[in-house]
Image (tube, helix red, strand yellow):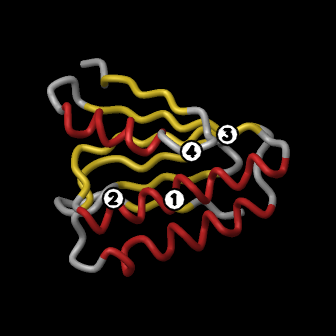
Amino acid sequence: MEPLIVYGAKDTPSVYFDKAAGIFEIAGISLPANVLDFFNPVLEWIERYIKDPNENTVLTLRMEYLNTSSAKVMNIIIHKFETILLTGKKVKVCWYYAPNETEMKEMGQDYSVGCKVPFEIKPIEE
């Protein structure tokens, strides 16, 4: 499976999904003009991945800011990874936030509620 690598810009996050390396990370600011144009390739890659996931998957989210539309898509992404649990494989989400960003910490906590995937919510160490 080919990796998905998207370089971040001022209003879009970087995405680095590489099944062979076991890296699944989204990082940065997300406020694209058209959220579906940006995230559809990500969602399609995840759909292919969940058909044959690794034994252990760690989704790392290092978000600095999410607009409302991006936050909804992030919820979809997290729940897509949740379906891997049904295959008997392990999944975890690591949510990182800047120590001074309580809003991002709370967003991670909100995502963890009602989600079957174990969450680790940690400040980014500087």
**In this figure, which residue is indicated by the disc labeled 4?**
115
Q: Position of residue 87 (x, y in %)?
A: 84, 51
**In this figure, which residue is indicated by the disc labeled 3?**
91
Q: Position of residue 76 (x, y in %)?
A: 50, 62
Whether pointer 4 and pointer 1 mark residues with C-beta atoms closer than 8 Å, the reply is no
Which kind of residue does numbered mark 1 sit on?
A: Ile
Q: The residue tagged with tag 3: helix, strand or loop?
A: strand
**Front in this rendered view, residue 91 or 25:** 91
Whether pointer 3 and pointer 4 mark residues with C-beta atoms closer than 8 Å, the reply is no
Which of pointers 4 and 2 indicates the residue nearer the eye?
4
User: Extreme right residue here?
Assistant: 88
Seen at 57% across and 56% down, the residue is: 79
22 displayed left or right of 124: right
| Tag shown at residue 71 | 2
**Going from the N terminus, do you reach mark 3 or mark 2 first?**
2
**Going from the N terminus, do you reach mark 4 or mark 2 first?**
2
**In this figure, which residue is indicated by the disc labeled 1?**
77
Q: The residue tagged with tag 1: helix, strand or loop?
A: helix
Q: Callout 3: 10 Å neighbours few (<14), some, many (20+)?
A: many
Alpha-carbon distance for marks 4 and 1? 12 Å
Quarter in which the C terminus is drawn: top left
Seen at 78% across and 64% down, the residue is: 51
